[in-house]
Amino acid sequence: MLRLKRRSAVVAGAAVFAALYAVLGTIPISQLLLGSGNFLTASNFTTPLAGMIFGPYVGGFAAVVGDLLDIYVGTISVSSVGAAVLAADLATVAVAGFAYSGRRTIAMLVPIVVLALYWVDPISVLFVGPVPFTWLHMLSLVPLAGALLLEKAGKISKLNPVFVASVTFGALLCGQLTGTLVGQELSVRVYQTLTLQAWRGIVPLFFPLYPVERTLFTIVGSAVSIPVLRALWRRQNPHAAG
């Protein structure tokens, strides 16, 4: 995490980020669930960046404020979908924030715990055909762990594109699975807007789509984050080489 030096700067920066996040949340990228009327938006490109800059707590607060603003203007519905979006963003920011603040063990534990919760939840669709639903989530742990170990050993810095992309990828996949987990619990158990049979019929429809979406968000998100992080670092270290 690139630490802003004064508390007032952190608050002001988080407020500006929340406003920007809300604006990006009005730009649809792909439909969240077929027929739901809710969309994944351009704000997903910057969700990990909130954690990278502000840390897991302030960054999470900024993302939630942005989401609440979108709920207020009607971009996100007040439903199980809205709660799933909030949960997904918080998980994404948490992984990125812990990774950038040097809390590497927690950065790894968060996605592992989410994976475990998904696998033990009886509502979860574990396989689509012979393929585990969480195949990409499990795969994302490999570059995340590798980047954290390389950074700890001093082989790469937190500004290295490999580190940024690996953390972004892992954070976004953790967020996607968290949103799915919360969404299925609320839709099937709490609000009962979907039957278990209906939910298990929906999951295979977005199963081939989420890897494409998360890869796109990783590529664009990393392309956005790298220059922003480097610019902030240069501003805080004006006399450093490079």
Image: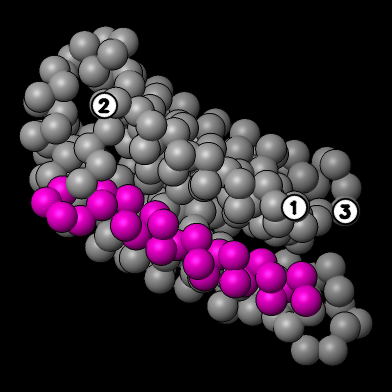
How far apart, in angstroms, are the residues tagged by discs 1 and 2? 32 Å
Residue 57 higher or lower than 29, as above or below: above
What is the x, y in percent for residue 27?
A: 31, 48
Residue topped by disc 2: 123
Quadrant for residue 190, please give it. top left
Check the image and name the residue furthest to the top.
191
Quadrant of the image occupied by residue 239: bottom right
Q: Could you tell which of marks 2 and 3 lies nearer the N-terminus?
A: 3
Q: Residue at x 44, y 62 (%)?
A: 140
Determine whether, in the image, residue 51 is placed left or right of residue 221.
right
- In reply to whether residue 131 is colored magenta, the answer given is yes
User: Element type at marker 3?
Assistant: loop
Q: Nearer the viewer, mark 2 or mark 3?
A: 2
Outermost residue, right direction? Answer: 239
Give the quadrant of the N terminus.
Answer: bottom right
Q: Secondary structure at mark 1?
A: loop
Whether residues under marks 2 and 3 lie with C-beta atoms below 8 angstroms apart, the answer is no
Identify the magenta region.
Answer: 128-153
Q: Quadrant of residue 163?
A: bottom right
From mark 2 to mark 3, how far is it between C-alphas? 45 Å
Q: Is residue 147 magenta?
A: yes
Mark 2 falls on what kind of element? loop
Q: Tell me if residue 63 can be seen.
A: no
Does residue 219 show up? yes
Residue 22 in picture, x, y percent from top left: 45, 40
Residue 159 position (above or below residue 35): below
Q: Which residue is mark 3?
A: 5
